[in-house]
Protein backbone atom coordinates (compact mmCIF):
# COMPACT_ATOMS: atom_id res chain seq x y z
CA UNK A 1 0.00 0.00 0.00
CA UNK A 2 1.38 3.41 -0.83
CA UNK A 3 1.71 6.14 1.75
CA UNK A 4 -0.93 8.26 0.03
CA UNK A 5 -3.62 5.60 -0.09
CA UNK A 6 -2.78 4.50 3.42
CA UNK A 7 -3.93 7.83 4.85
CA UNK A 8 -7.28 7.59 3.09
CA UNK A 9 -7.81 4.02 4.26
CA UNK A 10 -7.59 5.29 7.82
CA UNK A 11 -10.88 7.10 7.15
CA UNK A 12 -12.58 3.96 5.87
CA UNK A 13 -12.16 5.03 2.25
CA UNK A 14 -11.09 2.87 -0.65
CA UNK A 15 -9.24 4.08 -3.73
CA UNK A 16 -10.86 3.99 -7.14
CA UNK A 17 -9.38 4.86 -10.52
CA UNK A 18 -10.34 8.39 -11.55
CA UNK A 19 -10.66 7.37 -15.20
CA UNK A 20 -13.48 4.98 -14.41
CA UNK A 21 -15.74 7.97 -13.68
CA UNK A 22 -15.39 9.62 -17.08
CA UNK A 23 -18.58 8.16 -18.49
CA UNK A 24 -20.99 10.95 -17.58
CA UNK A 25 -23.26 8.69 -15.53
CA UNK A 26 -21.56 8.48 -12.17
CA UNK A 27 -22.14 5.72 -9.63
CA UNK A 28 -24.62 6.63 -6.92
CA UNK A 29 -21.96 7.02 -4.26
CA UNK A 30 -20.08 9.82 -2.56
CA UNK A 31 -16.62 10.36 -3.99
CA UNK A 32 -13.76 11.87 -2.04
CA UNK A 33 -10.52 13.57 -2.88
CA UNK A 34 -7.56 12.90 -0.64
CA UNK A 35 -6.47 15.76 1.52
CA UNK A 36 -2.93 17.00 1.96
CA UNK A 37 -0.60 15.44 4.48
CA UNK A 38 -2.55 14.83 7.69
CA UNK A 39 -5.70 16.48 6.30
CA UNK A 40 -9.07 14.75 6.05
CA UNK A 41 -10.29 13.73 2.61
CA UNK A 42 -12.72 16.22 1.07
CA UNK A 43 -16.02 15.47 -0.64
CA UNK A 44 -15.64 15.74 -4.42
CA UNK A 45 -18.99 14.37 -5.57
CA UNK A 46 -22.25 14.29 -3.65
CA UNK A 47 -24.51 11.28 -4.12
CA UNK A 48 -27.46 11.92 -6.47
CA UNK A 49 -25.93 14.95 -8.20
CA UNK A 50 -24.43 15.14 -11.70
CA UNK A 51 -20.72 14.59 -11.81
CA UNK A 52 -18.67 17.70 -12.54
CA UNK A 53 -16.88 16.43 -15.67
CA UNK A 54 -14.70 19.53 -16.22
CA UNK A 55 -13.47 19.26 -12.63
CA UNK A 56 -12.77 15.57 -13.21
CA UNK A 57 -10.80 16.39 -16.36
CA UNK A 58 -8.77 18.92 -14.40
CA UNK A 59 -7.95 16.31 -11.80
CA UNK A 60 -6.75 13.94 -14.49
CA UNK A 61 -4.69 16.72 -16.12
CA UNK A 62 -3.09 17.32 -12.74
CA UNK A 63 -2.17 13.65 -12.42
CA UNK A 64 -4.84 12.72 -9.85
CA UNK A 65 -5.39 9.10 -10.83
CA UNK A 66 -7.07 8.00 -7.62
CA UNK A 67 -10.23 9.12 -5.87
CA UNK A 68 -11.93 7.43 -2.93
CA UNK A 69 -15.28 5.96 -1.96
CA UNK A 70 -16.50 4.94 1.45
CA UNK A 71 -16.05 1.29 2.42
CA UNK A 72 -19.82 1.11 2.92
CA UNK A 73 -20.34 2.01 -0.74
CA UNK A 74 -17.58 0.02 -2.41
CA UNK A 75 -20.03 -2.68 -3.53
CA UNK A 76 -22.19 -0.09 -5.34
CA UNK A 77 -19.09 1.28 -7.02
CA UNK A 78 -17.99 -2.21 -8.13
CA UNK A 79 -21.48 -2.89 -9.51
CA UNK A 80 -21.31 0.37 -11.45
CA UNK A 81 -17.88 -0.54 -12.75
CA UNK A 82 -18.94 -3.92 -14.02
CA UNK A 83 -22.34 -2.97 -15.38
CA UNK A 84 -21.77 0.52 -16.75
CA UNK A 85 -18.11 0.75 -17.58
CA UNK A 86 -16.71 -2.67 -18.40
CA UNK A 87 -19.75 -4.00 -20.18
CA UNK A 88 -19.97 -0.95 -22.46
CA UNK A 89 -19.38 -2.47 -25.90
CA UNK A 90 -19.24 0.99 -27.48
CA UNK A 91 -15.86 1.62 -25.93
CA UNK A 92 -12.90 0.57 -28.06
CA UNK A 93 -11.31 -2.63 -26.68
CA UNK A 94 -8.05 -0.92 -25.81
CA UNK A 95 -9.86 1.76 -23.84
CA UNK A 96 -11.85 -0.92 -22.04
CA UNK A 97 -8.61 -2.69 -21.27
CA UNK A 98 -7.08 0.49 -19.83
CA UNK A 99 -10.12 1.06 -17.65
CA UNK A 100 -10.09 -2.51 -16.56
CA UNK A 101 -6.40 -2.28 -15.74
CA UNK A 102 -6.92 0.85 -13.65
CA UNK A 103 -9.97 -0.60 -11.97
CA UNK A 104 -8.32 -3.92 -11.21
CA UNK A 105 -5.57 -2.09 -9.38
CA UNK A 106 -8.19 -0.55 -7.12
CA UNK A 107 -9.85 -3.91 -6.73
CA UNK A 108 -6.64 -5.55 -5.61
CA UNK A 109 -5.92 -2.73 -3.20
CA UNK A 110 -9.44 -2.91 -1.80
CA UNK A 111 -9.04 -6.65 -1.43
CA UNK A 112 -5.75 -6.20 0.35
CA UNK A 113 -7.35 -3.79 2.80
CA UNK A 114 -10.72 -5.47 3.32
CA UNK A 115 -9.26 -8.73 4.55
CA UNK A 116 -12.08 -11.03 3.45
CA UNK A 117 -10.79 -13.81 1.23
CA UNK A 118 -14.29 -14.66 0.04
CA UNK A 119 -14.99 -11.16 -1.28
CA UNK A 120 -11.49 -10.96 -2.73
CA UNK A 121 -12.22 -14.06 -4.77
CA UNK A 122 -15.60 -12.82 -5.90
CA UNK A 123 -14.39 -9.43 -7.05
CA UNK A 124 -11.18 -10.63 -8.69
CA UNK A 125 -13.16 -13.38 -10.42
CA UNK A 126 -15.53 -10.85 -11.97
CA UNK A 127 -12.64 -8.74 -13.19
CA UNK A 128 -10.78 -11.74 -14.56
CA UNK A 129 -13.85 -12.58 -16.65
CA UNK A 130 -13.89 -9.06 -18.10
CA UNK A 131 -10.20 -9.25 -18.81
CA UNK A 132 -10.66 -12.46 -20.76
CA UNK A 133 -13.57 -10.85 -22.65
CA UNK A 134 -11.38 -7.97 -23.72
CA UNK A 135 -8.17 -9.81 -24.54
CA UNK A 136 -9.44 -13.10 -25.87
CA UNK A 137 -10.03 -13.38 -29.60
CA UNK A 138 -7.54 -10.54 -29.99
CA UNK A 139 -10.06 -7.76 -29.46
CA UNK A 140 -7.00 -5.85 -28.35
CA UNK A 141 -3.91 -5.83 -30.53
CA UNK A 142 -1.09 -7.02 -28.29
CA UNK A 143 1.32 -4.40 -29.57
CA UNK A 144 -1.08 -1.67 -28.43
CA UNK A 145 -1.65 -3.47 -25.20
CA UNK A 146 2.04 -3.60 -24.30
CA UNK A 147 2.17 0.13 -24.97
CA UNK A 148 -0.39 0.94 -22.30
CA UNK A 149 0.77 -1.40 -19.55
CA UNK A 150 1.55 0.47 -16.36
CA UNK A 151 5.27 0.98 -15.86
CA UNK A 152 5.22 2.49 -12.38
CA UNK A 153 5.64 -0.38 -9.97
CA UNK A 154 3.27 -0.81 -7.08
CA UNK A 155 1.89 -4.07 -5.73
CA UNK A 156 -1.34 -3.17 -7.53
CA UNK A 157 -0.08 -2.22 -10.94
CA UNK A 158 2.07 -5.33 -10.73
CA UNK A 159 -0.89 -7.62 -9.99
CA UNK A 160 -2.91 -6.34 -12.92
CA UNK A 161 0.08 -6.48 -15.28
CA UNK A 162 0.88 -10.04 -14.23
CA UNK A 163 -2.75 -11.03 -14.66
CA UNK A 164 -2.79 -9.67 -18.21
CA UNK A 165 0.54 -11.21 -19.15
CA UNK A 166 -0.44 -14.59 -17.67
CA UNK A 167 -3.54 -14.61 -19.79
CA UNK A 168 -1.67 -13.78 -23.01
CA UNK A 169 1.04 -16.34 -22.35
CA UNK A 170 -1.34 -19.09 -21.28
CA UNK A 171 -3.34 -18.67 -24.45
CA UNK A 172 -0.17 -18.74 -26.55
CA UNK A 173 0.84 -21.96 -24.82
CA UNK A 174 -2.36 -23.56 -26.02
CA UNK A 175 -4.76 -23.13 -23.13
CA UNK A 176 -8.06 -22.49 -24.86
CA UNK A 177 -10.69 -23.15 -22.22
CA UNK A 178 -12.35 -19.85 -21.31
CA UNK A 179 -12.92 -21.12 -17.81
CA UNK A 180 -9.24 -21.92 -17.36
CA UNK A 181 -8.18 -18.58 -18.82
CA UNK A 182 -10.43 -16.76 -16.35
CA UNK A 183 -8.93 -18.83 -13.55
CA UNK A 184 -5.41 -17.96 -14.71
CA UNK A 185 -6.20 -14.25 -14.99
CA UNK A 186 -7.66 -14.34 -11.51
CA UNK A 187 -4.65 -16.26 -10.22
CA UNK A 188 -2.44 -13.53 -11.66
CA UNK A 189 -4.37 -10.87 -9.75
CA UNK A 190 -4.07 -12.90 -6.57
CA UNK A 191 -0.51 -14.18 -6.87
CA UNK A 192 0.98 -11.70 -4.39
CA UNK A 193 -1.97 -11.63 -2.00
CA UNK A 194 0.26 -12.84 0.83
CA UNK A 195 2.21 -9.60 0.65
CA UNK A 196 -0.57 -7.92 2.59
CA UNK A 197 0.80 -9.76 5.63
CA UNK A 198 4.36 -8.61 5.04
CA UNK A 199 5.21 -5.46 7.02
CA UNK A 200 4.92 -2.33 4.89
CA UNK A 201 8.37 -1.13 5.91
CA UNK A 202 9.78 -4.24 4.22
CA UNK A 203 7.60 -3.99 1.12
CA UNK A 204 8.44 -0.34 0.60
CA UNK A 205 12.09 -0.47 1.60
CA UNK A 206 14.28 1.25 -0.95
CA UNK A 207 17.58 -0.30 0.08
CA UNK A 208 18.61 -3.95 0.14
CA UNK A 209 16.66 -6.17 2.55
CA UNK A 210 18.45 -7.62 5.56
CA UNK A 211 18.48 -11.39 5.97
CA UNK A 212 15.64 -11.23 8.49
CA UNK A 213 13.59 -8.96 6.26
CA UNK A 214 14.22 -11.23 3.30
CA UNK A 215 12.95 -14.21 5.33
CA UNK A 216 9.79 -12.23 6.10
CA UNK A 217 9.36 -11.37 2.43
CA UNK A 218 9.79 -15.02 1.48
CA UNK A 219 6.74 -15.94 3.55
CA UNK A 220 4.31 -14.23 1.18
CA UNK A 221 3.60 -17.26 -1.08
CA UNK A 222 2.77 -19.39 1.96
CA UNK A 223 0.68 -16.67 3.59
CA UNK A 224 -1.27 -16.11 0.39
CA UNK A 225 -1.83 -19.82 -0.03
CA UNK A 226 -3.04 -20.21 3.55
CA UNK A 227 -5.45 -17.35 3.10
CA UNK A 228 -7.03 -18.75 -0.03
CA UNK A 229 -6.88 -22.50 0.47
CA UNK A 230 -9.94 -22.58 2.71
CA UNK A 231 -12.14 -21.08 0.00
CA UNK A 232 -14.33 -23.41 -2.04
CA UNK A 233 -14.15 -21.28 -5.19
CA UNK A 234 -10.41 -21.44 -5.62
CA UNK A 235 -8.89 -24.14 -7.82
CA UNK A 236 -5.58 -25.97 -7.55
CA UNK A 237 -3.92 -24.06 -10.39
CA UNK A 238 -4.70 -20.71 -8.77
CA UNK A 239 -3.44 -21.91 -5.42
CA UNK A 240 -0.23 -23.01 -7.09
CA UNK A 241 0.18 -19.64 -8.82
CA UNK A 242 0.07 -18.09 -5.38
CA UNK A 243 2.22 -20.72 -3.67
CA UNK A 244 4.76 -21.67 -6.32
CA UNK A 245 5.45 -18.50 -8.33
CA UNK A 246 8.86 -18.10 -6.66
CA UNK A 247 9.91 -21.69 -7.23
CA UNK A 248 12.70 -22.04 -9.77
CA UNK A 249 13.28 -24.46 -12.60
CA UNK A 250 16.52 -25.63 -10.91
CA UNK A 251 14.85 -26.18 -7.53
CA UNK A 252 16.58 -23.25 -5.80
CA UNK A 253 13.43 -21.22 -5.26
CA UNK A 254 11.07 -20.94 -2.32
CA UNK A 255 9.06 -21.86 -0.28
CA UNK A 256 9.57 -25.57 -1.01
CA UNK A 257 12.60 -25.62 -3.31
CA UNK A 258 10.69 -27.86 -5.66
CA UNK A 259 12.17 -28.29 -9.16
CA UNK A 260 10.63 -27.80 -12.55
CA UNK A 261 8.75 -30.97 -13.26
CA UNK A 262 6.96 -30.87 -9.91
CA UNK A 263 5.74 -27.30 -10.29
CA UNK A 264 2.30 -26.51 -11.69
CA UNK A 265 2.28 -25.17 -15.27
CA UNK A 266 0.30 -22.09 -14.26
CA UNK A 267 2.86 -21.29 -11.56
CA UNK A 268 5.67 -21.57 -14.14
CA UNK A 269 3.77 -19.19 -16.41
CA UNK A 270 3.28 -16.80 -13.52
CA UNK A 271 6.98 -16.98 -12.57
CA UNK A 272 8.11 -15.82 -16.02
CA UNK A 273 5.72 -12.89 -16.37
CA UNK A 274 6.13 -11.93 -12.72
CA UNK A 275 9.86 -11.52 -13.33
CA UNK A 276 9.30 -9.76 -16.65
CA UNK A 277 6.99 -7.20 -15.07
CA UNK A 278 9.28 -6.72 -12.08
CA UNK A 279 12.18 -6.05 -14.47
CA UNK A 280 10.39 -3.70 -16.84
CA UNK A 281 8.66 -1.45 -14.33
CA UNK A 282 10.30 1.37 -12.41
CA UNK A 283 11.17 0.60 -8.81
CA UNK A 284 11.96 3.05 -6.04
CA UNK A 285 15.60 1.99 -6.26
CA UNK A 286 16.06 1.64 -10.03
CA UNK A 287 14.57 2.42 -13.43
CA UNK A 288 12.82 -0.42 -15.24
CA UNK A 289 14.77 -2.34 -17.86
CA UNK A 290 13.94 -1.73 -21.49
CA UNK A 291 12.17 -4.76 -22.97
CA UNK A 292 15.29 -5.93 -24.81
CA UNK A 293 17.34 -6.14 -21.61
CA UNK A 294 14.49 -7.94 -19.84
CA UNK A 295 14.32 -10.41 -22.72
CA UNK A 296 18.06 -11.01 -22.48
CA UNK A 297 17.74 -11.65 -18.76
CA UNK A 298 14.87 -14.09 -19.19
CA UNK A 299 16.77 -15.85 -21.94
CA UNK A 300 19.82 -16.14 -19.68
CA UNK A 301 17.70 -17.56 -16.87
CA UNK A 302 15.82 -20.06 -19.06
CA UNK A 303 16.56 -23.50 -17.67
CA UNK A 304 17.88 -21.98 -14.43
CA UNK A 305 15.14 -19.87 -12.90
CA UNK A 306 12.46 -20.44 -15.51
CA UNK A 307 10.91 -23.10 -17.69
CA UNK A 308 12.80 -22.68 -21.00
CA UNK A 309 9.77 -23.54 -23.16
CA UNK A 310 7.69 -20.88 -21.48
CA UNK A 311 10.47 -18.31 -21.74
CA UNK A 312 10.83 -19.06 -25.46
CA UNK A 313 7.11 -18.60 -25.97
CA UNK A 314 7.03 -15.33 -24.02
CA UNK A 315 10.01 -13.94 -25.90
CA UNK A 316 8.38 -14.88 -29.21
CA UNK A 317 5.22 -13.02 -28.20
CA UNK A 318 7.21 -9.95 -27.18
CA UNK A 319 9.25 -9.93 -30.37
CA UNK A 320 6.19 -10.38 -32.57
CA UNK A 321 4.60 -7.39 -30.94
CA UNK A 322 7.56 -5.05 -30.60
CA UNK B 1 -2.57 -58.99 28.00
CA UNK B 2 0.36 -57.97 25.88
CA UNK B 3 3.24 -56.19 27.56
CA UNK B 4 4.42 -52.80 26.32
CA UNK B 5 7.32 -54.18 24.31
CA UNK B 6 5.23 -56.65 22.37
CA UNK B 7 2.54 -54.02 21.78
CA UNK B 8 5.17 -51.72 20.37
CA UNK B 9 6.57 -54.54 18.23
CA UNK B 10 3.12 -55.27 16.85
CA UNK B 11 2.51 -51.60 16.12
CA UNK B 12 5.89 -51.23 14.50
CA UNK B 13 5.22 -54.28 12.33
CA UNK B 14 1.87 -52.84 11.34
CA UNK B 15 3.37 -49.44 10.55
CA UNK B 16 6.26 -51.00 8.62
CA UNK B 17 3.66 -52.83 6.53
CA UNK B 18 2.07 -49.60 5.39
CA UNK B 19 2.53 -48.32 1.86
CA UNK B 20 5.67 -46.22 1.61
CA UNK B 21 6.72 -44.39 -1.55
CA UNK B 22 9.62 -42.57 0.04
CA UNK B 23 12.98 -42.53 -1.65
CA UNK B 24 15.48 -41.48 0.97
CA UNK B 25 18.33 -39.13 0.01
CA UNK B 26 21.91 -40.47 0.26
CA UNK B 27 22.42 -39.08 3.78
CA UNK B 28 19.82 -41.55 5.02
CA UNK B 29 21.45 -44.64 3.60
CA UNK B 30 21.03 -47.70 5.73
CA UNK B 31 17.72 -46.36 6.97
CA UNK B 32 19.60 -44.28 9.49
CA UNK B 33 18.87 -40.64 10.14
CA UNK B 34 22.45 -39.46 10.07
CA UNK B 35 22.26 -35.74 10.58
CA UNK B 36 20.92 -35.43 14.11
CA UNK B 37 20.89 -31.66 14.34
CA UNK B 38 19.37 -30.87 10.98
CA UNK B 39 19.62 -27.18 10.16
CA UNK B 40 16.68 -24.94 10.86
CA UNK B 41 14.47 -24.20 7.90
CA UNK B 42 12.52 -21.09 6.90
CA UNK B 43 8.96 -21.24 8.14
CA UNK B 44 9.81 -23.36 11.17
CA UNK B 45 8.51 -21.57 14.23
CA UNK B 46 8.36 -24.27 16.89
CA UNK B 47 8.99 -22.95 20.36
CA UNK B 48 9.71 -26.05 22.40
CA UNK B 49 12.86 -28.12 22.35
CA UNK B 50 12.81 -31.11 20.06
CA UNK B 51 13.81 -34.67 20.57
CA UNK B 52 15.61 -35.74 17.43
CA UNK B 53 15.43 -39.30 16.24
CA UNK B 54 18.99 -40.34 15.39
CA UNK B 55 19.91 -43.90 14.52
CA UNK B 56 17.45 -46.19 12.79
CA UNK B 57 14.62 -44.27 11.21
CA UNK B 58 11.52 -44.16 13.39
CA UNK B 59 8.45 -45.04 11.33
CA UNK B 60 5.00 -43.57 11.86
CA UNK B 61 1.63 -43.95 10.20
CA UNK B 62 0.37 -41.01 8.15
CA UNK B 63 -3.09 -40.35 6.77
CA UNK B 64 -4.43 -37.15 5.18
CA UNK B 65 -7.49 -35.55 6.69
CA UNK B 66 -9.73 -33.58 4.29
CA UNK B 67 -8.75 -29.97 4.72
CA UNK B 68 -8.14 -28.17 1.40
CA UNK B 69 -10.94 -28.64 -1.10
CA UNK B 70 -8.76 -27.96 -4.15
CA UNK B 71 -6.15 -30.55 -3.17
CA UNK B 72 -7.38 -34.12 -3.76
CA UNK B 73 -5.91 -36.71 -1.38
CA UNK B 74 -6.45 -40.42 -0.99
CA UNK B 75 -7.54 -41.29 2.55
CA UNK B 76 -5.12 -44.19 2.88
CA UNK B 77 -2.38 -44.80 5.43
CA UNK B 78 1.27 -44.33 4.48
CA UNK B 79 4.48 -45.04 6.31
CA UNK B 80 6.56 -41.94 6.98
CA UNK B 81 9.64 -41.37 9.13
CA UNK B 82 10.06 -39.03 12.04
CA UNK B 83 12.88 -36.50 12.07
CA UNK B 84 12.08 -34.95 15.42
CA UNK B 85 9.31 -34.47 17.92
CA UNK B 86 8.47 -31.78 20.44
CA UNK B 87 5.61 -30.93 22.76
CA UNK B 88 3.90 -28.92 20.05
CA UNK B 89 4.76 -30.60 16.78
CA UNK B 90 6.98 -32.83 14.71
CA UNK B 91 8.96 -33.14 11.52
CA UNK B 92 8.57 -36.07 9.19
CA UNK B 93 9.87 -37.35 5.88
CA UNK B 94 7.07 -38.00 3.39
CA UNK B 95 7.06 -39.02 -0.25
CA UNK B 96 5.09 -36.04 -1.55
CA UNK B 97 4.55 -32.39 -0.99
CA UNK B 98 2.25 -31.45 1.87
CA UNK B 99 0.78 -27.96 1.72
CA UNK B 100 0.75 -25.47 4.58
CA UNK B 101 -2.50 -25.76 6.48
CA UNK B 102 -3.19 -29.32 5.34
CA UNK B 103 -4.29 -31.65 8.11
CA UNK B 104 -3.09 -35.18 8.60
CA UNK B 105 -3.28 -37.83 11.27
CA UNK B 106 -0.08 -39.36 12.57
CA UNK B 107 0.06 -42.75 14.29
CA UNK B 108 3.02 -43.06 16.63
CA UNK B 109 4.74 -46.18 17.89
CA UNK B 110 3.30 -45.76 21.38
CA UNK B 111 -0.13 -46.30 19.87
CA UNK B 112 -1.20 -42.69 20.10
CA UNK B 113 -2.69 -40.81 17.19
CA UNK B 114 -2.37 -37.08 16.77
CA UNK B 115 -4.00 -34.66 14.38
CA UNK B 116 -1.42 -32.36 12.78
CA UNK B 117 -1.48 -29.25 10.65
CA UNK B 118 1.39 -28.81 8.20
CA UNK B 119 3.31 -25.55 8.59
CA UNK B 120 6.00 -25.91 5.94
CA UNK B 121 7.47 -28.39 3.52
CA UNK B 122 10.90 -28.66 1.91
CA UNK B 123 11.95 -30.66 -1.09
CA UNK B 124 14.74 -33.20 -0.61
CA UNK B 125 14.21 -35.25 -3.75
CA UNK B 126 11.30 -36.13 -6.04
CA UNK B 127 10.08 -38.78 -3.57
CA UNK B 128 11.15 -37.21 -0.30
CA UNK B 129 9.92 -34.07 1.41
CA UNK B 130 10.68 -32.85 4.91
CA UNK B 131 7.47 -31.62 6.50
CA UNK B 132 7.06 -29.57 9.67
CA UNK B 133 3.71 -29.69 11.42
CA UNK B 134 2.02 -28.58 14.60
CA UNK B 135 -0.22 -30.81 16.68
CA UNK B 136 -3.78 -29.58 16.51
CA UNK B 137 -5.38 -29.26 19.92
CA UNK B 138 -8.54 -31.31 20.04
CA UNK B 139 -10.59 -28.55 21.61
CA UNK B 140 -9.60 -25.88 19.13
CA UNK B 141 -9.43 -25.79 15.40
CA UNK B 142 -5.74 -25.11 15.21
CA UNK B 143 -2.77 -24.48 17.40
CA UNK B 144 0.21 -22.28 16.88
CA UNK B 145 3.16 -24.03 15.31
CA UNK B 146 5.11 -24.51 18.50
Image: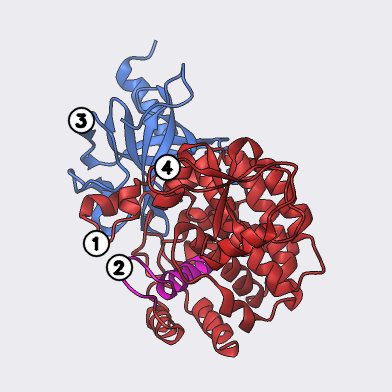
Name the residue: 69% across, 59% down.
A53
Task: State whether residue B22 appears in this view.
Answer: no
Same chain? Circles 1 and 3: no
Q: Nearer the viewer, residue A90 or A144?
A: A90
Give the residues drawn in magenta, as a range: A268-288
Q: Which disc, if any, is residue B49?
A: 3
Rendered hue of chain A is red
Q: Give the alpha-carbon distance from disc 1 to disc 3, as whole Å.
A: 36 Å
Q: Which disc, if any, is residue A285?
A: 2
Name the residue: 32% across, 72% down.
A286
According to the picture, the residue beneath numbered tag 1 turns out to be A207
- Contact, mark 3 vs mark 2 (Cβ under 8 Å): no
Task: Name the quadrant of the C terminus of chain B.
Answer: top left
According to the picture, the residue beneath numbered tag 4 turns out to be A39
Residue B42 among those drawn in magenta: no
Quick one: label 2, few (<14), some, or many (20+) residues within 10 Å? Answer: few
Amino acid sequence: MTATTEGACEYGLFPIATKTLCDGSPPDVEIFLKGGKGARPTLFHKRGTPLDQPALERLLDNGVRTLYVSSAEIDQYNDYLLAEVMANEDRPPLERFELLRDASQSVVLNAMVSGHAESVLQVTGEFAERLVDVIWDRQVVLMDLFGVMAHDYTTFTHASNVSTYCLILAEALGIRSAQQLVSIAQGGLLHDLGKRHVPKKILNKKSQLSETEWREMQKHPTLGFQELCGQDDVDLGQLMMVYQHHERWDGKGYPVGIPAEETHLWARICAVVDAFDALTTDRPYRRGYVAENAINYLDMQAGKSFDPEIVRCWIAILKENS
Amino acid sequence: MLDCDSQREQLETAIRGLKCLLSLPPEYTGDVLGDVQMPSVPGCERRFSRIYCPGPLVPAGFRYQPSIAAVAREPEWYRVYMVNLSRGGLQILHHEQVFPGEHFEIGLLDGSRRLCRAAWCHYLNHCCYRVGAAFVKESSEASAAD
